[in-house]
Image (tube, grey):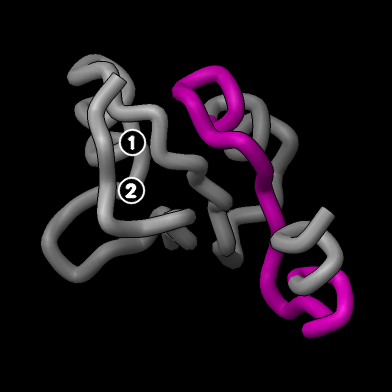
Amino acid sequence: MNKSNFDLCILDLNLPDGNGITWLTWLRKNQHSLPVLILTASNSIDDKVTGLKNGADDYLVKPFDLRELLARLYS
């Protein structure tokens, strides 16, 4: 288990230089246990399942209510 200076990663799937799933897959293959919440406009069931199967701990679709995000972060 690798240590991190971060408590959590909030990850969008549509990154300027690539796909968030690629980064998430790399993170998990390298044994990083950093919790990852995907926060994205990609709202299909296939996208959600792909994100969760590739190691995301949670998945939230934009637009979102800040109260829901806070509930997910502090539960």
Between the residue at mark 1 and the residue at mark 2, the CA separation in whole angstroms equals 6 Å
Q: Position of residue 2 (x, y in %)?
A: 24, 28
Q: Residue at image x 43%, y 61%?
A: 12
Mark 2: which secondary structure? helix
Can you tell which quarter of the image residue 70 is in?
bottom right
Left-right relation of 17 to 36? left
Any mark on residue 20, and which? 2
Q: Residue at image x 21%, y 27%?
A: 26
Vertical position of residue 1 compared to residue 11: above or below = above
Vertical position of residue 17 compared to residue 54: above or below = below
The amino acid type of the residue labelled 2 equals Gly
User: Does 1 appear in magenta?
Assistant: no
Q: Residue at image x 57%, y 62%?
A: 39
Q: Residues within 10 Å of mark 1 (few under 14, many from 20)?
A: many
The amino acid type of the residue labelled 1 equals Leu
Q: Position of residue 32 (x, y in %)?
A: 30, 28
Left-right relation of 31 to 54? left
Most distant residue in the bottom direction: 66
Q: Position of residue 48 (x, y in %)?
A: 65, 37
Any mark on residue 24, and which? 1
Point out the image quarter for the N terminus: top left
Q: Residues within 10 Å of mark 2 (few under 14, many from 20)?
A: some
Magenta span of residues: 51-69
Q: Residue at image x 19%, y 19%?
A: 30
User: Does 64 appear in magenta?
Assistant: yes
| Marks 1 & 2, CB-CB < 8 Å contact | yes
